[in-house]
Image: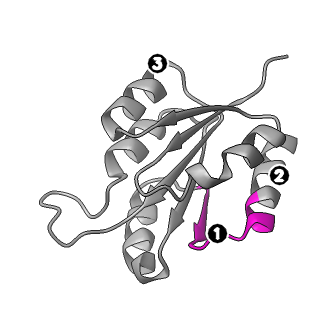
Amino acid sequence: MSAPALLMVNAFIGTASFKKLYQELGYAVVSEWSERKAIALVRKTPPAVIVADFFHQTDFRDRLSNLESLLATAQASAGTRILVFYESAHQAVLDKVAGRLRVDAALTLPVDEARLREVLQGWLAA
């Protein structure tokens, strides 16, 4: 049986610092810096897990966050779990986005490694 794929979408490095943990848990890790390339990967081969940094900027013209296009694409893959890391100041915006698009788990920065491990292990066991 092959290792489940975990896609790290690295906007602000928050996700990258846990690569060894992801591998230790048994995930085959794929990294992508470009949201556009990450969307193409999700369409071609949906991963078991997407881990991405979430952020909000007031100058976004047609969206609330950096992840809405990726999240919209991932909705078609019911087997893909979505985990986002976010600053607590962006909680209200994340709540709005999560009201429209599925987000399976969200962890505030700095991420508690024990909590991250617990979430990912739970998904492996499911």
Give whichever of 28, 68 is nearer the camera.
28
Q: Which residues, given as a range, are shown in magenta?
A: 104-116
- Give the residue type that dot 1 points to: Val
Q: Which mark is residue 92?
A: none
Q: Residue at x 35, y 40 (%)?
A: 35
Q: CA distance from mark 1 to mark 3?
A: 29 Å
| Circle 3 residue | 44
Task: Tell me the residue at 76%/50% (across/down).
Answer: 120
Q: Which mark is residue 111?
A: 1
The residue lying at 56 percent from left, 73 percent from top is 109
Assign a secondary structure to mark 1.
Answer: loop
Q: Quadrant of the N terminus?
A: top right
Q: Are marks 1 and 3 in contact (CB under 8 Å)?
A: no
Q: Secondary structure at mark 2?
A: helix
- Tell me residue 3's x, y (percent): 78, 25
Q: Residues within 10 Å of mark 3 (few under 14, many from 20)?
A: few
Q: Is residue 71 above or below residue 76?
A: below
